[in-house]
Image (cartoon, rainbow, N blue to C red):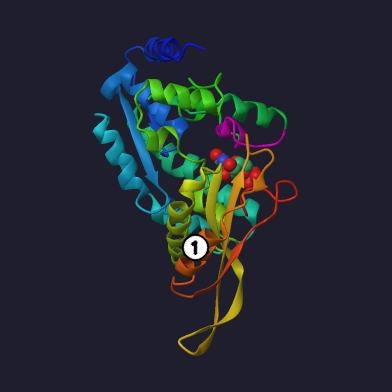
Amino acid sequence: MDYEAFVEEKIAEIRRAVGRGRAINALSGGVDSAVVTVLGHRALGERLRTVFIDSALMREGEPESVRDVFAGMGIPVEVIDARADFLGALAGLTDPEEKRHAVTSTFYRKVFGDLVRQSGATYLLHGTILTDIEETVAGIKRQHNILAQLGIDPMAEYGYHVLEPLAELRKDGVRQAARVLGLPPELAERIPFPGPALATRIVGEVTEARLQLVRAATAIVEEELAPTKAFQYFAVLLEDKATGIRGGRREFGQIIVVRCIDSVDAREASAVEVPWETLQRICARVTSLDGVNRCLYDLTPKPPATVEYV
Ligand code: XMP
């Protein structure tokens, strides 16, 4: 495919569809929404409002770094502080599906829904890709056209249309488009990060303190495992605890799991043979976090495991 031509065609399509109207999009910092943001801005300029919703579930420094990268490209990104909404919706929940539902519905029904209504936008740009559509049709995933899945008709409820400029691309195509658009490698080559974010990496209740812990462990694991060039790598906080010794005293502490997988499209995955020294370094750093006295490496392929824990 000629990606230069693809990009120009999509910019023209967005411009034609939106006309003199206004559009809005939510940027997560992943490559799909990043490409949509750049396409939208090339097409509409300041008639596109781009928001980054700080859900409290993102990785260390993520809202700031995403905003700064886009500012460097001349694209303003508004960071919306919705931490209290998400933490409130997740409080007391431990069931995985209930947690996922709380995140999705807080995002679409409340936070983003309110923003769209206030913005006067009549078009919403969405980073759906071909794989999302195929997996939804096959019943593997539930992420395409999330509004329809929640029983929301965007036109009837909010009065806007949804545009999906990446619907004919797979991930490798999106990365090609990202390169053509001049997105920096830290965005174009980013490892996948799920929509429900760190909530998928905390077994049990999601609280501010537990988020802080998994966020710190994630920063260590991402830094140490980036050289592996694996498909995905991250830290998980378990609900169980284990006995350990710190400062000569027994403590009942937290358990962090390290996961590092190779995969083509995340439908199947296998654990990477990470060098022992790297694992030992990760273990030393992770167990120096307050209250953590175990660090485990997950060897399980998908199937029977999934990639994420929740
Ligand atoms: P699982 O855990 O289902 O993950 O084996 C497969 C791939 O999908 C990512 N993932 C998600 N991505 N929304 C997303 O955008 C989600 O709800 C979601 N759940 C899992 C996961 O990180 C892995 O790459």
Q: Quadrant of ligand 1?
A: top right
Residue 126 in magenta stretch: no
Q: Position of residue 69 (x, y in %)?
A: 30, 37
Q: Quadrant of residue 274?
A: bottom right
In the rendered view, would you say 45 is above or below 288?
above
The residue shown at (46%, 47%) is 226
Q: Can residue 210 be seen at all in this image of the molecule?
A: no
The residue shown at (67%, 46%) is 270
Which residue bears the numbered disc 1?
A: 282
Task: For mark 1, give the secondary structure.
Answer: helix
Would you say 202 lies left or right of 57 here? Answer: right
Would you say 223 lies left or right of 94 here? Answer: left
The residue shown at (38%, 34%) is 185
- Dot 1, crowdedness within 10 Å: few (<14), some or many (≥20)? many
Tell me the magenta residue range.
Answer: 139-150
In the rendered view, would you say 3 is above or below 302?
above
Q: Name the foreground residue: 131 vs 266.
A: 266
Would you say 210 lies left or right of 242 here? Answer: left
Q: Main secondary structure of the magenta part?
A: loop
Q: Name the foreground residue: 42 vs 305.
A: 305
Q: Can residue 143 be seen at all in this image of the molecule?
A: yes
In the rendered view, would you say 87 is above or below 229?
below
Q: Quadrant of residue 104?
A: top right
Q: Position of residue 210 (x, y in %)?
A: 48, 65
Q: Name the foreground residue: 141 vs 226.
A: 226
